[in-house]
Amino acid sequence: MMSTLKVAVIGCGSIAKHRHLPEYAGNKQVEIVAVCDIVEERVNEFAKLYEAKPYTSYEELLANPEIDAVSVCTPNYLHAPISIAALKAGKHVLCEKPMATSKEDGEEMIKAAEASGKKLMIAHNQRFVPSHQKARELIEQGELGKIYSFRTAFGHGGPEGWSADGKDSWFFKKEEAFIGAMGDLGVHKTDLLRYILGEEFVEVGAFVETSAKENADVDDTAVCVLKTESGIIGTLAASWSYVAKEDNSTIIYGENAIARLLDDPVNSLILQYKNGAVVKYELGGIQTNDSGGQTSTQVIDKFVKSIVENGESPVSGAEGLKSLQVVLAALESNETKKIVRI
């Protein structure tokens, strides 16, 4: 049994504040030893709260030999450079999604992980939602029969209600975020669908607009049509323009039944069979920004466990890259007005 895992969190915005830091703090095998943010006031506040050493330079933090693992919770454009630097410095890396802003950067991250022999995990938390895991299992067992189609949506009122910087958030700035709602929310769903269906997407068509956010130079509303290798077709909507209730739902249409994965705290998976039977699975709700973090995303615990037990990365760089490529193909489709093959 190894001694306590010493971790650091780079980037102290909302995802670090609400997820990474409290979930590390709640893990008995972990000690938070360092935090880093370019905003000195912010990093000092978290350093005090978690009794960790504050850094304003990630390079300095990575030079600290006692750190075993880091979470990269920065704006999107810094995910790849910081993750690569951390892997080269011999640290395990948990990187927020989307893992990178290009296929090339994603590939470099994977290479760096292989070369260092350290874990690289991408924080795709929707895979760990019990109702999603149950749906995958039922589809794998053939309970729904042949899968014909799906529709999935992830939308809310936008990052200004969530991000540490509100309306001035990096989420709205193309040079820092690179992609808007598609990168923030859409990539969650491309990853989830790949996971649930157990297939890769091969073709993508998309419309990607900035219609709701006057302060944004990235997309805030996207609708995609996706096709898998076996010919399952469906739609994915990702949006920051759903002004009232958040939508975080997926419906899978099969020959024997329809599986409804709804953001319902009680019946989070409902199977409606062709013969009229209805089965409701009480598996707990989806972890959302609204739920105030009462339920753990499990991302941190699974990351820590993979290091402590030297197991496979729960969501590898290769998996993260496949989910990112669907998003990149959607952006390309919108620009070229053509269906894009992956």
Image: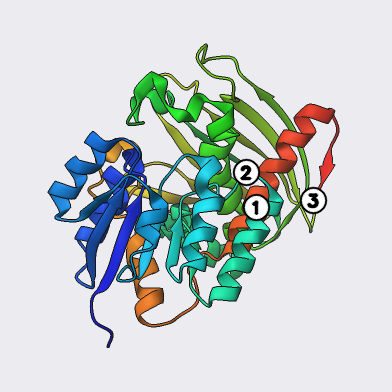
Note whether residue 144 is visible: no
Left or right of residue 171: residue 325:
right
Figure quadrant of residue 107: bottom right
Question: Badge 2 is on which residue?
Answer: 101
Residue at (46% x, 38% y) in the render: 248
- Asked whether the beta carbons under mark 1 and mark 2 sit within 8 Å of each other, the answer is yes
Under mark 2, the amino acid is: Thr
Residue 71, position as x, y percentages in the image: 39, 56
The relative height of residue 283 versus residue 334 in the rendered view (above or below) is: below
Q: Secondary structure at mark 2?
A: loop
How packed mark 2 is, by other alpha carbons closer than 10 Å (few <14, some 14-19, many 20 or more), is many
Q: Secondary structure at mark 1?
A: helix
Q: In the rendered view of the protein, which quadrant contains the N terminus?
A: bottom left
Of residues 68 and 239, the one drawn nearer to the viewer in this rendering: 68
Q: Nearer the viewer, mark 2 or mark 3?
A: 2
Q: Secondary structure at mark 3?
A: loop
How packed mark 3 is, by other alpha carbons closer than 10 Å (few <14, some 14-19, many 20 or more), is some
Question: Badge 3 is on which residue?
Answer: 342
The relative height of residue 298 versus residue 47 in the rendered view (above or below) is: below
Residue at (13% x, 48% y) in the render: 49
Of residues 218 and 283, the one drawn nearer to the viewer in this rendering: 218
Q: Nearer the viewer, mark 1 or mark 3?
A: 1
The relative height of residue 123 versus residue 65 in the rendered view (above or below) is: above
Residue 310, position as x, y percentages in the image: 42, 82
Note whether residue 301 is visible: yes
Q: CA distance from mark 1 to mark 3?
A: 17 Å
Residue at (65% x, 52% y) in the render: 105
Under mark 3, the amino acid is: Ile
Under mark 1, the amino acid is: Asp
The relative height of residue 172 versus residue 199 in the rendered view (above or below) is: above
Question: Badge 1 is on which residue?
Answer: 105
Q: Earlier in the sequence, mark 1 or mark 3?
A: 1
